[in-house]
Amino acid sequence: MPLQRRILILVSAVVLLTVIGALAVVRASSRAGEKDRVQAGGPAITRGEVSLAAGDGGRRIVFRNMAWGPHRDELATAAAGAPEGPRTASGVSCLRFHAAAGTGICLRSDKGGVQDAYKAVVLDARLKEVATRPLAGIPTRARVSPGGHLVAWTVFVGGDSYAGTNFSTRTSLLDLRSGRYDASLEDFTIHKDGTTYRNADVNFWGVTFAADERTFYATLATGGRTYLVRGDLAARTVTTLRENLECPSLSPDGTRLVFKKRVPGLSPDAPWRLYVLDLATMAEAPLAEERSVDDQVVWTDDKTVVYSLPGDFGADLYSLPADGSGAPARLMTSALAPAFLG
C-alpha cells in the first residue's frame, strides 16, 4: 500500500475517533443536563425548611430526593401519611443519609480537583453541621442510634459492590456524647466460636443500633463468609451470632432483625432475599419480596420495613410487612435513604 494512502487512512481513523469521542461527551453532557429538568408527572417539589426534630410537623419522612429537576439529590421531606404528595427540599445534598432523635448523618461528595473527596457530616435538627470526618472511600451505609447519640457509616475502600467478594469496607463509629471516634470497627476485639479471632481479611458493614445506645449489630465478613455480630461499645467487642446475614436492621422494640441473605441458586449479581430473625429464638423466615434487595431496610414501626429498589429515576421505595405476610407495595417514587420521624 502506498505511503500516501496509509497516511490518509490513519488521518481518517483519527478524525473518526475524535468525532465519536466528541459525540459521546456531548451526549453525556446532555444526559446530565436532563437530570436538572423537571420531568412531567413527577412529584411537586418546593424549596423550604426541613427539620429532623421529632415534634416538628407531625409524622413525616426525610429522604434523599431522586426526582429529576433542580432539587435532585437534596434531602427532602414529605408527610408519612401522604408519601407521594408534595415534597419540601432542603438544599442540602447527601449520597447517603439517616436520622433519628434530631440527629442526622450525611455522607457527601466534595467535588474539586482530579478526584472527588468524601466526608461524613453530622447534622443537627435544623440540618446545620456539628461535626465532620473525612471518608476513606465511597459512601455506602449510614445509621443514627434511636437516641441520636451515636452515628455509624461504611465506605468502600476497594471495590464498589457487595455482590462479589473482591471488595473492602471500612466502618466507623462516632459517639456524640463523648466525642470518641472509632475510625474502624476492625480495631474492636472479635469473639468468634468462643475464642478471640484475628484475620487480615476482616470487613464490617451495616451497623444498626439498639435503644440502650451501647449495643449494636453489624455484618462481619471473613474467610469468604458473612456473620451477624453483636457489638458492645463500652467493651469494644463484637461477637458472632449467626452465619449468612448482611445489613441487619433492628426493629424499634429490639426483638427482631430484618436482613438480606444470600440464597443459593440466585444470580451472582442479585443474590439476596430479605429475611427476618427473631432474636429470642434465633429462628429466621423469608419476607414476601422475591426481588433481590441490596439495601439496609428501615423500620417504619414494629410491623413494617421500607427499602429501595432501582427505579426509572434512580430508586423507588417499597414497604413490606416484617412478618412474612402480605406483598411489597411501592411507597415513594424517586426517593432513597428514608428516615421516619415524628
Image: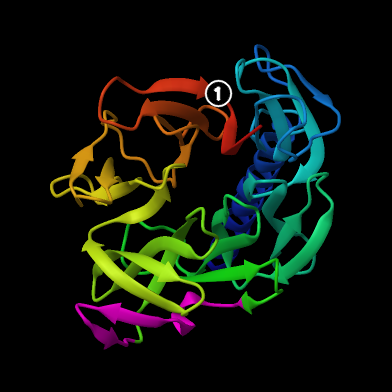
In the displayed structure, would residue 183 be above or below residue 217?
below
Q: Residue at x 58, y 77 (%)?
A: 182
Residue with the mark numbered 1: 332
Name which residue lies at 40% across and 61% down.
Answer: 217
Residue 107 in picture, x, y percent from top left: 66, 56
Q: Position of residue 241 (x, y in %)?
A: 25, 65
Secondary structure of the residue carrying numbered label 1: strand
Which of the two residues, 71 or 7, is positioned nearer the viewer here? 71
Decide: is 198 above or below 101.
below
From the viewer's perspective, is 132 left or right of 197? right
Query: Which color scheme does this rendered protein use?
Result: rainbow
Tell me the quarter of the image containing the C terminus.
top right
Q: Position of residue 224 (x, y in %)?
A: 24, 71
Q: Is any atom of residue 272 visible in this view?
A: no
Locate residue 14, reporting x and y percent.
62, 58
Stretch in magenta: 182-199
Of residues 208 and 19, the one nearer the viewer is 208
Nearer to the camera, 79 or 14: 79
Q: Nearer the viewer, residue 107 or 151?
A: 151
Report whether 171 appears left or right of 54.
left
